[in-house]
Amino acid sequence: MLRTIAGFDRIGEENAFAVLARATTLSSQGRDIINLGIGQPDFKTPDHIVEAAIKALKDGHHGYTPATGILPLREAVAADVEKRTGAAVSPDNVLIVPGGKVTMFAAILMFGEPGVDILYPDPGFPIYRSMIEFTGANPVPVPIREENEFAFSAEETLSLITPQTRLLILNSPANPTGGVTPSGEIEKLVEGLANHPQVAILSDEIYGQMTYDGEAHVSLMEFPQVRDRVILLDGWSKTYAMTGWRMGYSVWPDELMDKARKLAVNAWSCVNAPAQFAGLAALTGPQDEARAMVEEFDRRRKVVVDGLNAIPDISCRTPKGAFYAFPNIKATGWKAKALASALLEEAGVAVIGGPDFGILGEGYIRLSYANSTENIQRALERIGNFLSGSQAKG
């Protein structure tokens, strides 16, 4: 028998892709499946971005690029981050990566090892915990509570830090809850982190341009007192409907940048060249389609929340960001994953069970409203009809 290192026995996965695969199989069998499971915009990448990639190919950009990314793109990222956060960023601190998960992988690998603690949001993106366990570090969940509008609590987060804590992962706007942590809470967290100078911060801000109801996104980059230990995770997938392009970026402190660059050289060499030119066009070109997409998500958000709250035994807080709703289904009597499975197999609606996002996800399901209003309304009707005619199951 082949022997692998213990880390590969601990590694998890993202169940949204398993649900997507099952939904695709059912669709291929002729079933009418409404997919509210996968977290990707249902819009096409804007034409000017696609044309930039085509032009790059025709112009001969077929070879390697620097491991950190082409300079014009890194300059555009630095300028965009400064415009949105007020933080001066050098292109030399920007790393272009093949998708947002790569920044998680790099940061957690850099700080994770047996004997150290890494704090992460629960419920939260499942790859956080998966990668922490892969490194052998101790995963310490930071509770994300419905009664706190799915924002993290600065006081509770700080109380979990010990001398063994090496990395703190934050995510706002958040997946899977749509929660947005207000500025006052982030300010309190930053003040408290002054007492823990050994703790690095991975700030996942991939949904930072998707907020609603006048809620402002507050970036950790805005706070000079922690700027020298913040790793910013962001990219193009959500904002510009570019999930399949596999394009992300990170901004690293001076002390860590060369380590991240060397990891890039060892692991992926560079991001494909034409995609980088597409990313450049996204940042420097017209932003009207990106804004229109968020406006449409806002309209759908209201349909989702109103529709869920109209279903007996379901309650749903209004998400302030991203494109997810995280309704409470405890009163239905169903366990979350069992309900998600039954909704897909019996009602033809793909959603994700809350426990796929952490221990504290039990009692919730995640719906993505990155689908048409018509499909969302049909899905809500199916969910309501299913629950009214079913018996709760574990």
Image: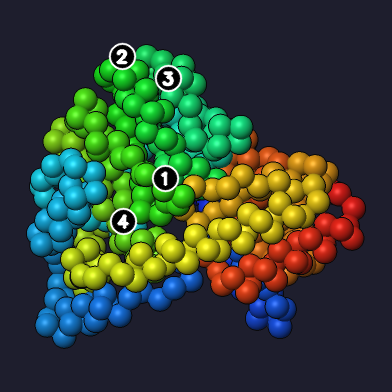
- The residue to which callout 1 is attached is 215
Residue 156 or 115: which is nearer the viewer?
Answer: 156
Does residue 3 appear in the picture of this structure?
A: no
Q: Earlier in the sequence, mark 3 or mark 1?
A: 3
Residue 258 in percent (x, y) is at: 14, 41
- Which image quarter holds the C terminus? top right
Of badges 2 and 1, the one in the foreground is 1
Residue 291 point in image, percent of width and height = 35, 64
Please tell me whether mark 1 sits on a helix, a strand or a loop.
loop
From the viewer's perspective, is residue 1 above or below residue 155?
Answer: below
Kind of residue indicated by mark 1: Glu
Q: Residue at x 41, y 28 (%)?
A: 185
Q: Amino acid at mark 2?
A: Asn
Q: Could you give the CA–CA distance between mark 3 and mark 2, rounded to whole angstroms?
A: 10 Å
How far apart, in angstroms, are the residues tagged by discs 4 and 3?
28 Å
Question: Hey, which quadrant is residue 283 in on the image?
Answer: bottom left
Of the residues tagged 4 and 1, which is closer to the observer?
Answer: 1
Please, what is the three-letter code of the amino acid marked with disc 3?
A: Leu
Q: Nearer the viewer, residue 114 or 70?
A: 70
Q: CA distance from mark 2 to mark 1?
A: 29 Å
Residue, disc 2: 195
Q: Name the residue beneath numbered marker 3.
A: 158
**Considering the numbered disc 4 on the image, is that residue within a helix, a strand or a loop?**
strand
Chain-order first, disc 2 or disc 4: 2
**Rendered image quadrant of residue 98:** bottom left
Residue that sits furthest to the front in the current view: 214
